[in-house]
Image (tube, rainbow, N blue to C red):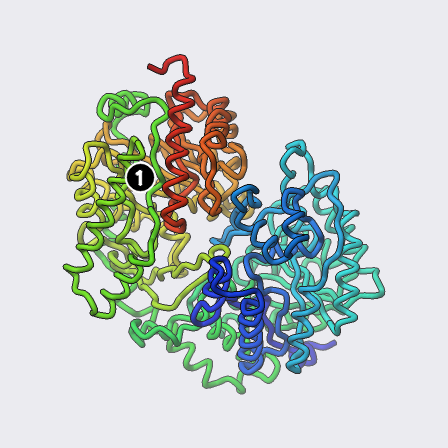
Amino acid sequence: MTSKSAAAAARATVYGYPRQGGGRELKKAIEGYWKGRVDADALRATAAELRRTNWRQLAEAGIHEVPTGDFSYYDHVLDTSVMVGAIPGRHRASVEADALDGYFAMARGTQDVAPLEMTKWFDTNYHYLVPELGPDTVFTADSAKQVAELREALGLGLAARPVLVGPVTYLLLAKPAPGVAADFDPLTLLDRLLPVYAEVLSDLRAAGAEWVQLDEPALVQDRTPAELNAATRAYRDLGVLTDRPKVLVASYFDRLGDALPVLAKAPVEGLALDFTEAAAANLDALAAVGGLPGKRLVAGVVNGRNIWVNDLTKSLATLGTLLGLADRVDVAASCSLLHVPLDAAAERDIEPQILRWLAFARQKTAEIVTLAKGLAQGTGSITGELAANRAALASRANSPITRDPAVRARVGAVTDADARRSQPYGERAAAQRAHLGLPLLPTTTIGSFPQTAELRVARADLRAGRIDTAGYEERIRAEIQEVISFQEKTGLDVLVHGEAERNDMVQYFAEQLTGYLATQHGWVQSYGTRYVRPPILAGDISRPEPMTVRWTTYAQSLTARPVKGMLTGPVTMLAWSFVRDDQPLGDTARQVALALRDEVNDLETAGTSVIQVDEPALRETLPLRADGRPGYLAWATEAFRLTTAGVRPDTQIHTHMCYAEFGDIVQAIDDLDADVISLEAARSHMQVARELAAHGYPREAGPGVYDIHSPRVPSADEAAALLRKGLEAIPAERLWVNPDCGLKTRGWPETRASLDNLVAAAHAVRAELPTAD
């Protein structure tokens, strides 16, 4: 096919779409179901209506082929586990008794049964449920969800493409099930899994699918020859099937690298590549293999992970280059639009001048359609769109909002000494022990306490003018009093003020820093029914005035026990925001770090002896390929130290990380030079404690003994058992006792019971120590 005919064939598509609805209807329906206020039929009806709304919006915008199967009640990887019958043994009875309740039990656990482990989806802030597999796993096909949703879309008269997690990525994301040897490799189950995928593909073809998309983002990571061989076998075996739809293998988040020749040669009909995160690398690699003759190429030229308007002229140039490399070139976002908010037009509080710089899911859909039209019909068909786009890009580039000379001068004056504590850890630790007087196995929490309905109503009342600032602050003071009183009665050693005044651990700070924009409706799914509104980093960052000192000092006035100051670290402030794309991330990180450094120093001056700077995103932002990691970790750890290094030796600096794989960043954790780190460990059975020990980590650590992302209350004996596992790796004089993460999403009854049990466990194990009083 000539380039001209390839252009004429250009179509617009997306890989996935936000699930929650414009008013977060899905969240409300699911949580209503959990509380017994919504029955299963009503929940299913809400979900079906949301799917129909999404598909109609996409089709009306000009998307030629809508995705199906990307919708989920909780997580698409969990949906894949259901599709292939990989139900953990401990959940089989509940799944057999009621499929929907069993599904949520796998995600959230029950009082008697632990949930699946949860961790980050590649380098995003989305969390997936980790499949548990072993040598005895038996896969069975269950294509009911995928078939039903395809038929729904076809019934609306739409061209639809089911989207599934590919078999290789599914196995690479999995872990050995509890009780299975730690060195078991789930990829050895590939030959057992492929017939199940073949059956699902056959079912989808029978239901009317012309194409099926198999997502293989794991192949953009560094892969061994054995893993690449597995991909070769997988798509050879699936490709030669006769009873299947056409197969589109999709990758995203980085360059495909050594896997590109594997997939280019595979007997499948199409390949989807990311031309935003790794445009040059994927272009060069595609040309090196001779393109994709006779195949469909879906070009992800619109960034599916950030919210800035696309440079349409640049994207058209990329698409033009691709025309000679494939039989057909279609236009898409770089990945699922799950990772961005739904509609920028809903934002009423952002200045119109700035709003034109932003593209959420609906605006990105329009960009994709415009690019497909321009590719198929020529740029003359989109002259108006191109002119408006150029004006928006110029407006942003020339705006004084984006540059603050004072901030840039301060960053330029930073020296290496600014990012080093005045004394080494050993000397600091002795000073801190003398100053704080804590027992062995000190107990604490991560920071937040339950955000009750009353607190959310108070914030809404303040925004609506139903109460004034004085009335709102009185409610916050009352909540802090209750949190401090509860912690003292429970017997916790280091307290927190509970963060009652904070809407979100990033947004709260972003709203008080210059250079950030906050949205009112920019919700993005983090996990399950947990949605966040990532702020937007639009300009240079500074801190006009203290952000946390007032409430931390108030909490400290209520107790003689130390109260931690609580801040969100610079890397997490970037990772959980939509970041600038007009300067290096390291430059932005230093700006945020200096603003936070001012806050840390003001907390210390106000009498705060323990300051926690959370960095849960340090691991998730790690580049997917090894060659990008040293540079990232250098500026990321420097930014943390720049935030924290200005305090006295006897001020104890804590940090916190959660829900990620930590083994490959232990050296970076060490390089942070925090005095104490708390980490998620309950679902992984203290794996991180063993990893710290293997590294020889010399500082204090609190691997979590209470999984806060489940409503179940762990018993004191269960917490004590985990604590004893922690002691096998970390000596008692350096081991803390704490939950996995903050308690914001939990209710007060389970929080009280769980923390009572946590403290009881610490006392019991403390009494077993030979050095205990």
Q: Which of 318 and 689 is in front in this view?
A: 689
Q: In this view, does 771 lie to the left or right of 541?
A: right
Which image quarter is the N terminus in? bottom right
Amino acid beneath label 1? Gln
Q: In this view, does 750 lie to the left or right of 331?
A: left
Labels in figure, total? 1
Residue at numbered disc 1: 612
- Residue 244: give x, y in percent of width and height: 79, 66
Which residue is pictured at 27% across the width and 55% down the height? 541
- Residue 452: give x, y in percent of width and height: 33, 54
Q: Nearer the viewer, residue 257 or 459?
A: 459
Picture layout, residue 184 above or below residue 310: above
Which image quarter is the C terminus in? top left
Q: In this view, does 388 lie to the left or right of 57?
A: left
Outermost residue on the top side: it is 770
Picture layout, residue 580 above or below residue 21: above
- Residue 70: give x, y in percent of width and height: 60, 64
Crowding at mark 1 (Cα within 10 Å: few <14, some 14-19, many 20+): many
Which residue is pictured at 70% across the width and 64% down the height? 144
Q: Is residue 303 visible?
A: no
Which residue is pictured at 76% across the width and 46% down the height? 138
- Residue 583: give x, y in percent of width and height: 38, 57
Q: Is residue 758 visible?
A: yes
Q: Is mark 1 on a helix, strand or loop?
A: strand
Q: Which of 548 and 644 is in front in this view?
A: 548
Q: Which of 615 and 500 is in front in this view?
A: 500
